Amino acid sequence: MPWPGTEVAREAEEAGVSAFCAAEFADHDAYVTLAEIVANTENALVGPAIAYAFSRTPYAHATALRQLHAKAPGRLFLGLGSAAFRINRDWLGVPPERPVARIADTVEAVRAWLHAENGEKVRHDGEFHSIDADVRAPVLGRLDIPVLLATFNAGMARTAGRVADGVIGHGLFTRSWWNDVVRPAVDNGAGTRPRLLEHGWIITAVDDAAPERAVADARRMIAFYLTVRTYDPFVAHHGWEGPVERLRAAFHAGDTDGMARAVTDEMVTAIAVCGTTAEARSALHARADALPRDIGYLAPPTFLVGRKRRAAYARASFALIDALPGQAPEAAGQ
């Protein structure tokens, strides 16, 4: 689950949630949120999913993790994402070109700081980052914190396979996108390396009292993501150009209801888990091979969804925790 706040998170851990992730946007910082998660959870795996890779230096990513490791040893992972071209150029004011090559070098530079031993220089000589740091204070020591990359298109997936410890799949991912595009590209990049960790988040909106509203929120979330042209290869792969053209027209007209209407039932079924509890549990079973293999984050829609409703979706998703692949619907209470 993404971080739903202290009260809900305590209930979530008691219900069996074993991992939380911290997101990042214009109004919330991944590491500030991660500090709150660390302070208010006991055993769950925690980390950014994702932090903007280029908004901070490798040093800043690593030092934040070192400080948090002291409070949550063995519980951390680092999820990095390249962010969209416009975010890098217009929001962050950093070079937007060649994000795949840049993030590969960033991963290695972050690892240089995380793996640094006391008494040794921290060195990295890459295309985008150069480090030659002599830290005399005894504050280092190797930390083997997994570094995962947010992976969408095949080029980033191959790079993750080559340099990262794992991948973080997007909430738009479908069975076909995982199996036909992302996993083969990761394997191609990894070569003979062991299988990488596979995290991912799943758009999840459950409301037994108003399932139609939950489905509408999921549709709106799908539509909002698909306004970004970065995902055009995904759209073409599924043959969804017509609906996406309509939802983008609605978005530019400020018609959020029209955006939701443009998302087809086929798209909702392939992407989201939504509706009643029974429908959501059934959807998880049906998508057994379309889910991340290691950790799936049940992620409430956030586009035009308030905090209280997101918290309600988070609580409702507790009923899905035992509805996992490999468990027959009857055994899961269907």
Image: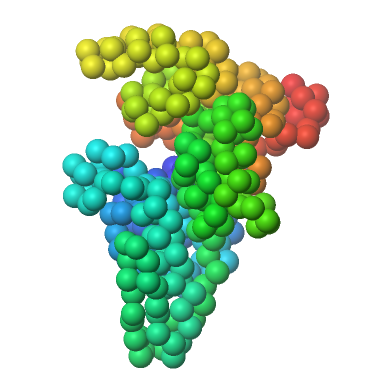
Total count of labels: 0
Q: Position of residue 175 (x, y in %)?
A: 62, 27
What residue is at 53 percent from the left and 46 percent from the top?
A: 158
What residue is at 55 percent from the left and 13 percent from the top?
A: 266
Q: Is residue 194 visible?
A: yes
Comparing 283 with 172, the one in front is 172
Comparing 44 with 102, the one in front is 102
Q: Quadrant of the C terminus?
A: top right
Comparing 268 with 130, the one in front is 130
Q: Quadrant of residue 251?
A: top left
Q: Is residue 37 visible?
A: no
Q: Position of residue 2 (x, y in %)?
A: 46, 43
| Residue 135 in the figure: left or right of residue 295 | left
Where 233 falls versus 162 (above or below)? above
Q: How is the image coloured?
A: rainbow
Q: Position of residue 182 (x, y in %)?
A: 56, 37
Q: Quadrant of residue 135?
A: bottom left
What residue is at 26 percent from the left and 41 percent from the top?
A: 87
